[in-house]
Image (cartoon, rainbow, N blue to C red):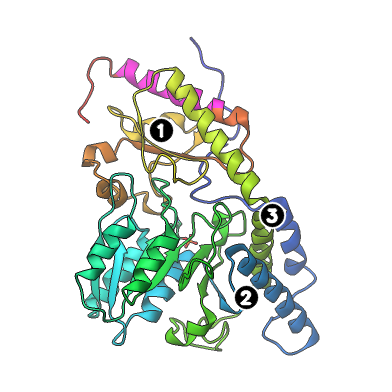
Amino acid sequence: MTQPAPPAEPLYLDFAASAPPAEEVVDAMLPWLTGRHANPHADHWHGQRAAQAIDEARAAIATLIGGDPEGVIFTSGATEANNLALTGLLGPQRNRLWVSKIEHKSLLAPARALERDGVEVNMLDVDRQGRLRSSALAEQLQREDRRPGLVAVGHGNNEIGTIQDIAALARTAHENGHWLHVDASQTAGHNPLAVADDEIDLLCLSSHKMYGPAGIGALYVDPHQMSELRPLLHGGGQERGLRSGTVAPFLAVGFGKAAELAHRRIDQHRQRLESLARSFLDVLDAQGLDYALLGDPIERLPGHVSLHIPGVWADDVLGRLLPWLSASSGAACASGEQKASHVLRAVGLSETQASQVIRISFGRTSQASHALEAASQLLAALRRIHAVEAGSGFGN
Ligand code: PMP
């Protein structure tokens, strides 16, 4: 059977890596790139106009996460915000950290750097679905004395999609005298969050994961606790002294617009993405494909599908899918590395199995037809691989 020619541009199905800015976001940003130029930290009229726009964005972000606008510190992205949370808080006074083994490298790498500087770092196991149970956390924390520390955990995992019960983890951390930092890069704007109600001390967000521009993110710090943090960057003392450097009005305004849209559409958006992922998997099931959906089957990021397909290398599958669709074999940030993903290893996959995982993530502009197209292209790629390697099979 001959295949039709591939489209001029492959279908984009990697929204967990980066979600393109919504049209409303671009429209809101444009005036700040053209006529309305000013340094928002200047006292004159133009500066104050820009400062006001930034504060409106701050307020929209605070509303999205149920916090106080005073607690929103703009950064260059979630990587910087995670670094600021850990490195800004931990030191001689608070020198213990618990971090789960499935965290993004922007949490794990500063943890390692702090360990070299004398901070005690404890790695927390997760179960096979990637859940960090609050009972397991309590067990770990109760073994220790109550010298204050920090527990750091991602709300939604970028590789396997599992969502943690943050309110329960926050309670456990506090009962044992520690703070909780949450990496909400994958969930902000997709899954409801409430920093005040859930008593989250620190939380980071990434604009380009929620249809805002890349290059900006934020750290939320409970305003009453802000004085406990030290800045990474020293300079003009912007962002309440925690992040020196001129805030870019066009980025902040775009991020704020993305937060406002997300807040308004969050339930509808989630339901749509869940149904796209479901119809994609329904096609695979109808064709009897042998696969395992990784992560928690219920508590998971909407539209996020992480599949272990035994017997085929992810790179081979993605290579064949390349002209048709853009998906990922794990975290985009880690691509280029040959090592198996630390997340997949931590949920019990072998090195070989971890090389057989592909991630497809649907987003705001995905259509029902895209889910069907993606499933049929994946099945066609697998048929071509099996045709070439007929009978050779390789271990799981
Ligand atoms: N944390 C998680 C869970 C992520 O998925 C990412 C992006 N892959 C980051 C942090 C880093 O975000 P940013 O690109 O904004 O630095």
State the residue in front, 151 or 141: 141
Cβ of disc 1 within 8 Å of ligand 1? Answer: no
| Label 2: few (<14), some (14–19) or many (≥20) C-alpha neighbours in 10 Å | many
Q: For the view shown, which residue lies furthest in the top direction?
A: 1
Residue 84's spot in the image, x, y percent?
43, 75
Residue position marked by numbered label 1 in the rendering: 319
For marks 2 and 1 on the same chain, the one whose residue lies earlier in the sequence: 2
Q: Is residue 273 visible?
A: yes
Residue position marked by numbered label 3 in the rendering: 264
Q: Are marks 3 and 1 in contact (CB under 8 Å)?
A: no
What's the mark number on residue 69?
2
Q: Quadrant of ligand 1?
A: bottom left
Q: Are marks 2 and 3 in contact (CB under 8 Å)?
A: no
Residue 342's spot in the image, x, y percent?
28, 52
Q: CA distance from mark 3 to mark 1?
A: 38 Å
For marks 2 and 3 on the same chain, the one whose residue lies earlier in the sequence: 2
